[in-house]
Amino acid sequence: MTPDPTMTRIGQGVELHHRQGQREAARELFAQIWDDIGGEQGDPLHVCVLAHSMADVQDDVHQELMWDLRALAAVGLITDERVAQAGVPLSVAGLYPSLHLNLSDCYRKLGDLDRAREHLQQARAGIGALGDDEYGQLIKGGLKQLAEQLDDAG
């Protein structure tokens, strides 16, 4: 299977952000990829993964939320066949917990605790689709931490 070049580029941006701490460089790369794929008209897998990654490099929580909502809108258009074709080691169902985790955190930051709890509940409902691998543990740990923050918030 040939690697998906767009997914490879998105991975490079994630690497810039998470491993190298170059948030601005990652944001610039993601913006270029967004233009290259045709924005929201692009391949839903690319739109979802790119928007989800772009949300992580935003300085403003409203922008972060906008990108996370774009990712959630696109995930419903993705098939498991497309995910496998791109070499992503998850099912479509495995994408939802992370998307809802990020949305829940955005709403928490904005003080909308009801929406934050709704998305936390949706994320928890989907954790059965996650493996017991590094990614699954990361998302499950994030859900636990967010639940504690929401409990502390009232």
Image (spheres, rainbow, N blue to C red):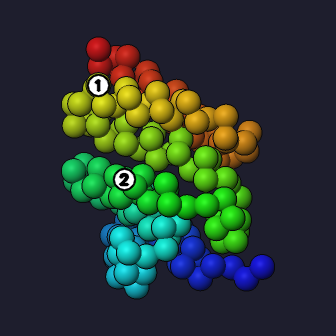
Residue 145 shows in the view: no
Residue at position x 41%, y 44% from top?
A: 102
Which of these two is toward me, 24 or 58? 58
Q: Estimate the spatial distance between the alpha carbons at disc 2 and disc 1, rounded to whole Å.
A: 17 Å
Residue picked out by circle 2: 68
Task: Reply above or below: 73 against 125.
Answer: below
Compared across the picture, whether 108 is left or right of 149 comes to left
Residue 64, percent across and down? 30, 53
Which of these two is toward me, 53 or 38? 38
Residue at position x 56%, y 30% from top?
A: 125
| Residue 137 figure quarter | top right
Amino acid of disc 2: Asp
- Local packing at callout 1 (Cα closer than 10 Å; few below 14, some 14-19, many 20+) is few
Task: Reply above or below: 43 against 122.
Answer: below
Residue picked out by circle 1: 114
Task: Reply above or below: 5 against 109.
Answer: below
